Amino acid sequence: MKFLRGLLSRKDDQLRRKAERLVSSARVNATSLFAPTIDQHALLRNVKTERWDFVVTIAGVFIATTRLWNLKIGDQREQELTDIIMRSLAHWNPNNGIPGIEDCKATFERNFDAFTRAQHEPRFITSDSVGWWVVCNLLMRAPEGSEEERKLVRIIGTAITRTFFSWWSV
């Protein structure tokens, strides 16, 4: 029993460390995605680096946080880790961090439901839902459905989802 408790506490510590690193890791991810994505998608050439960093960071944090809520680690533990993430967001961007997550969540949920009802390709529902939010916020308008915009939604959403979907794996 003592061994099991020790194993569980190490796992909990790992989750806490991951929660503490999430925002900074999402920022690094956003920075690393900027140049290659802009180079391949001309419609993003007018997007300012600061805007990109904010939007893509928020999307990464959102995906990881959503996955946290699916871990079934208990309400108290989940809330503790979520609080760490929200404090990090508020520290990083006091005015827009938490509202950004709330907006991403609301848009994601609408898109996820709409894509599900429309029988969208199941393996892309999550990535396209978050990618839609990212592209809307980068272009400052909803994607109009062009081939280039659809590709951009898929590419950005997939890159973010692949990076943060398994964030909590230990």
Image (cartoon, grey):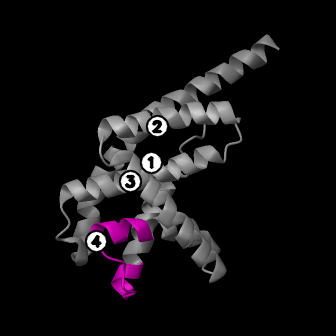
How far apart are labels 2 and 4 at the CA level?
26 Å
Q: Earlier in the sequence, mark 1 or mark 4?
A: 1
Q: Which residue is under mark 3?
A: 100
Q: Amino acid at mark 4?
A: Met
Indicate the amino acid at tag 2: Ile
Coordinates of residue 113 in the picture (x, y in percent): 61, 72
Disc 2 and disc 4 in contact, CB within 8 angstroms = no
Q: Earlier in the sequence, mark 1 or mark 3?
A: 1
In space, the residues marked 1 and 3 are separated at their CA atoms by 10 Å
Q: CA distance from mark 4 to mark 3?
A: 14 Å
Residue sitting at x 70%, y 21%: 7
Q: Earlier in the sequence, mark 2 or mark 4?
A: 2
146 or 158: which is nearer to us? 146
Relative horizontal placement of residue 153, taking residue 32 as reference (left or right)? right
Q: Which residue is mark 2?
A: 85
- Asked whether 50 or 11 is in front, the reply is 50
